[in-house]
Amino acid sequence: MSSTDVTSEGGHGAVPTGPEVPVETKPAASRRDWPLYEVFVRGKRGINHVHVGSLHAPDDEMAVHAARDLYTRRNEGVSVWVVKAAHITASSPDEKDPMFAPSGDKVYRHPTFYEIPEDVPHM
Amino acid sequence: MAHEETVYDALGNAQDDHGHWAFGTGFDEPLAGVDTTVPEGIGPADLGAYCLMLGDDALVLAQRLTQWITAAPELEEEVAIANVALDLLGQARLLLARAGSVGVLGRSREKATDSIPDEDALAYFRDPDEFRSTGLVEAPNGDFARTMVRLLAAATVRLAVFARLRESRDPVLAAIAAKGVNELAYHRDHAARWVLRLGDGTDESHRRAQAGADAVWPLLDDLFTATDVEARLTAAGVAVDPAEVREEVVSVLTEVLERATLRVPEWPADAAPRGRTGEHTAELPELLATLQGLARQHPAATW
């Protein structure tokens, strides 16, 4: 199997879909057709939405509901975002060094030479 | 300054009074600070009987929904169904505890040992004829579409009752209702979303949703007739007359089904209460056998 026969389902590992893989016959609207969503939750004391995981849902509305049911069951969140995983453009692991290494020695970019006043929140 | 790196960080630090690690933080005790004395002029026997009606509906529907666990069509939906069932179980617990607190325990204490709390005695050691749940929640699940239509109907009725019950003269019922309204609004919403998608989905999902509605509608016949207990407590400002919610229920269910491109089945004529007076189908004993089997074989077992 060449690498083009393998598609990745949202970072959960490669799922072989080549013609030689026996595929169980399923009704048209099977789970395979449900898009993958990435879920972001804002906690009670958090100020930003944080990625917590992913889920499959038939559409955007149901994805928000499923996110509430799967990721805020234990009183974690006050706000939920979902976004189709397909809509996320990610940096490539192959480009890791060109992307991130150049900032590794630029200590002067850190605001460590300032005193942060006590009453400035979220720093 | 305590900015959470992840929303789950707070969980790791959360502990209860005994130093046990606990999930989540900031849970509210629903009955904290609520006066539990029975208001003047209210018969404790009536109040307890009414709590059993509302509590048993929740307990039995929770058990029905739980039957989907490990069998739901999708993992995400399985968790959603479990959440709904747990909400209902929580409502049942509070309502049965209220019934026990005013001395309504039926014959449960003949079998339950003293160490078993009232709500457990009522849930696990009452026989089917002592249950006051309605046929709507007792009926088998059927397929997923029918389960969602039944949940839609049950949540719609219960939400309409609980919304009014927030004004109850019994402060405990009022507090339970105030907590339950948010839960039930979500249950109704969740079920309605599925009914919309199934009704207005594929030919097969439409067929199943229609069959579900046709099977569920006859079960609505005895929901809107007050028992003597409900009539007395409604007059006393404690309970909700089920006839009062009929119009809202009809309007909500009709709107959802029409938007789901489903035919609204003929509304059954109002009938005398059956489940509310202890008259049940053979399905209830079967369901209770599963629900109560473990507790009866191992009374007061803990885990």
Image (tube, helix red, strand yellow):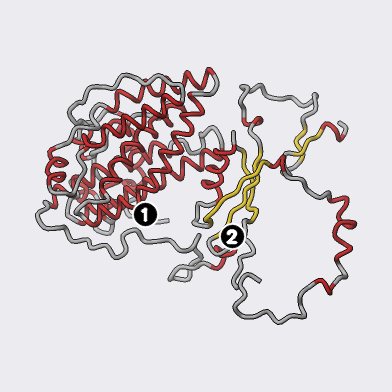
**Vertical position of residue A90 compared to residue B75: above or below:** below
**Where on the picture, by quarter, is residue B76?**
top right
Chain for numbered disc 2: B
Mark in the foreground, 2 or 1: 2
- x and y percentages locating residue B267 in the rendered image: 29, 22
Q: Quadrant of the N terminus of chain B?
A: bottom right
**Vertical position of residue B28 compared to residue A1: above or below:** below
User: In this view of the protein, which residue sits in the foreground, B214 or B55?
Assistant: B214
Q: Amino acid at mark 1?
A: Ala
- x and y percentages locating residue B164 in the rendered image: 26, 45
User: In this view of the protein, which residue sits in the foreground, A123 or B283?
Assistant: A123
User: In this view of the protein, which residue sits in the foreground, B151 or B73?
Assistant: B151
Q: Amino acid at mark 2?
A: Val
Structural crowding at the residue carrying mark 1, measured as other residues with C-alpha within 10 Å and reported as few (<14), some (14–19) or many (≥20): few
Label 1: state its secondary structure: loop
**Vertical position of residue A28 compared to residue B156: above or below:** above
Structural crowding at the residue carrying mark 2, measured as other residues with C-alpha within 10 Å and reported as few (<14), some (14–19) or many (≥20): many
- x and y percentages locating residue A21 in the rendered image: 77, 27
- x and y percentages locating residue B45 in the rendered image: 13, 49
Chain for numbered disc 1: B
Q: Residue at x 79, y 73 (%)?
A: A110
Answer with left or right where residue B81 lies relative to residue B106: right
Q: Residue at x 63, y 33 (%)?
A: A34
Work out whether mark 2 precedes mark 1 in sequence or the reverse, and give the earlier one.
2
Q: Residue at x 23, y 57 (%)?
A: B171
Residue B7 disc label: 2
Answer with left or right where residue B185 lies relative to residue B171: right
Residue B301 disc label: 1
